[in-house]
Amino acid sequence: MHSRIFTSELRAVYSRQGADSRAGQIVDALLEQSSEFAGLWSAHEIGVRRERDSKRVQHPGLGILELHCQVLFDADQAQVLLVYTATPGTESHEKLQLLSVVGDRQSHA
């Protein structure tokens, strides 16, 4: 699934920037070196999204946090903002709230 997503995202950039762009160079190199990429590229997929938008983050002071990841694109999709949230009432939500108070104090101790 990751290969499909990355290929789809590369195709979207390639479509905006053209064959003479850095994206075009990457596509050319991958087409020469990877039969898997060539097969995915020939499918012409754009907009493939992750099915599972949850992440497990290991924080050195708080342990594992189970977070949901929302991907926000700017108007021309030149930049991406990842927003991590936790389900209210869960241990991860409590840890995330604590993290907003504690911040990076532990790294300076």
Image (cartoon, rainbow, N blue to C red):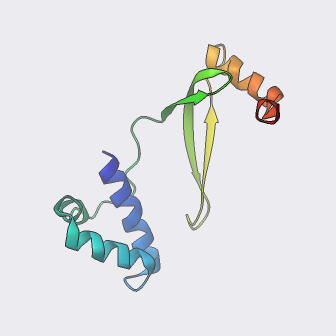
User: Is 44 above or below relative to 63?
Assistant: below
Viewer can see residue 16: yes
Name the residue: 44% across, 78% down.
22
Q: Is residue 97 above or below residue 11?
A: above
**x and y, in percent, of residue 38 in the image:** 20, 65
Picture layout, residue 51 above or below residue 102: below
Quadrant hosting residue 66: top right
Q: Is residue 77 left or right of residue 38?
A: right
Give left or right: position of 101 versus 8.
right
* Quarter residue 80 falls in: bottom right
Q: Residue furthest bottom?
A: 20
Instruction: Judge left or right: residue 57 versus residue 105.
Output: left
What x and y, as percent, mark residue 15?
A: 40, 74
Q: Quadrant of the C terminus?
A: top right
Q: Position of residue 86 (x, y in %)?
A: 62, 25
Q: Can residue 87 be seen in this snapshot?
A: no
Instruction: Look at 30% across and 45% down and name the residue there.
Output: 1
